[in-house]
Image (tube, helix red, strand yellow):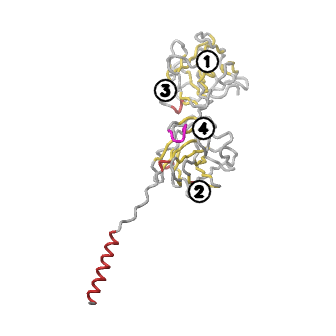
Amino acid sequence: MKKYFLISIVLALFITACVKDEQPTPTPPPPVDYSKITINELITKDTTSPYYVDGLGEGADWIELYNSGTIAMNLAGMFVTDLPGSEADYIEIPATNQAATTIPPKGFLVLICGAKNADGSKVPTSIADGKIFIEMGLSSSSDNFAALYSPTKELVDQSADFNGLADDKSFGRQAETVDTWITLATKTPGAPNDGTLPAAGTLVINEFMCSNDTTFIPDNVGPDNYPDWIEIYNTGDTPIDIGGWYLTDDLTDPIQYQIPNNMPEQTIIPGHGYLLLKADGTGIGINLGFKLGSGGDDIGLSQDGVSFVDELSFGSGTGSSIVAPLPATDFSSGRMPDGSTTWQVFDPNTATGPTPGSANGM
């Protein structure tokens, strides 16, 4: 009887072990879905009532993130960069303060970029007083995109091209869940985007010099550093790419010279910004394929190659009803103030002489 009892115990233990081995292993938690986190708004130079004032008393750049999901998300360990595709330049969001790095559902989180200490040194990537600092500044002239990556460095979201963004203007989605990016009329860090377009403006011929002996123009392509030149001004808040537009000194031939459309780093004019074009006759890049007549000429700017966005005549030029004064050698003619309908001659011997590429009368 004792023998059978022992056998029963062994069989019970064996069956128990088998049943235990056959129990399913726990299901691992699903991977974190970072796709609900998007870049929603950014600014490259915050000057008026800035979101964050650094140790130098200047407004820092910032990137706003949005959580379109239904659960809170902790972004610690994700990466942000202004150089998508260059892993060496990815900056990790710190994991030292979960409350600071968590976005509630339908909520926002702002990354402060490029802040400086009182001694001018960069604020390192860190969390202080509940704010996230990223040691990376945004530039309207050299950067094009901001990007967000998962902790495993997989692309989660990327902004549209913000090259040429005007100072104190933010660039963001027209609404939080749409892909249309615009320059926003009102910046709203940490809140829903305004979605209103700022004044679009247009491009005007703002200043020109038709006989240049002493005004040095830094060379970008051609050999002549004392060429005739034409300055274009953007009257609005929104960047405009002049690539593909036309300039001419013959109003009967509006397509005389086309600005290349494959070099936006040189052809985007920021809001209230300037583009200086050499009229040196080389026709290389943004160097125009014609020169201006020292005794007079016409100038026309066209987007479609048919009608003129702006045009003028000076001196012996007679093609336009808009007449600018003829400037002497080393003098320029320009609008005063920028973008206005009033033209005057700027004397190089005075404090308000020619200003190629910058504000007139300064």
Closer to the N terminus: mark 4 or mark 1?
4
Alpha-carbon span between mark 3 and mark 4: 34 Å
For the record, the magenta segment spans: 173-178
Q: Which residue is mark 1?
A: 210
Give yes or no for contact between labels 4 and 1 (Cβ–Cβ under 8 Å).
no
- Dot 4, how many residues are within 10 Å of its Cα: few (below 14), some (14-19), or many (20+)? some
Alpha-carbon span between mark 3 and mark 1: 23 Å
Q: Looking at the image, is mark 3 or mark 4 nearer the viewer?
A: 4
Alpha-carbon span between mark 4 and mark 1: 45 Å
Q: In terms of depth relative to the viewer, which is nearer, 77 or 286?
A: 77
Q: Secondary structure at mark 1?
A: loop
Residue 334 location (% of width, % of height): 66, 21
Amino acid identity at mark 4:
Asp
Amino acid identity at mark 3:
Pro
361 left or right, relative to 137: right
Amino acid identity at mark 1:
Cys
Residue at x 60%, y 40% (from the top left corner): 44
Is residue 176 within the magenta segment? yes
Residue 294 location (% of width, % of height): 61, 14
Q: Which residue is mark 4?
A: 194
Q: In terms of depth relative to the viewer, which is nearer, 335 or 71?
A: 71
Q: Which residue is mark 3?
A: 260
Closer to the N terminus: mark 3 or mark 2?
2
Q: Secondary structure at mark 3?
A: loop
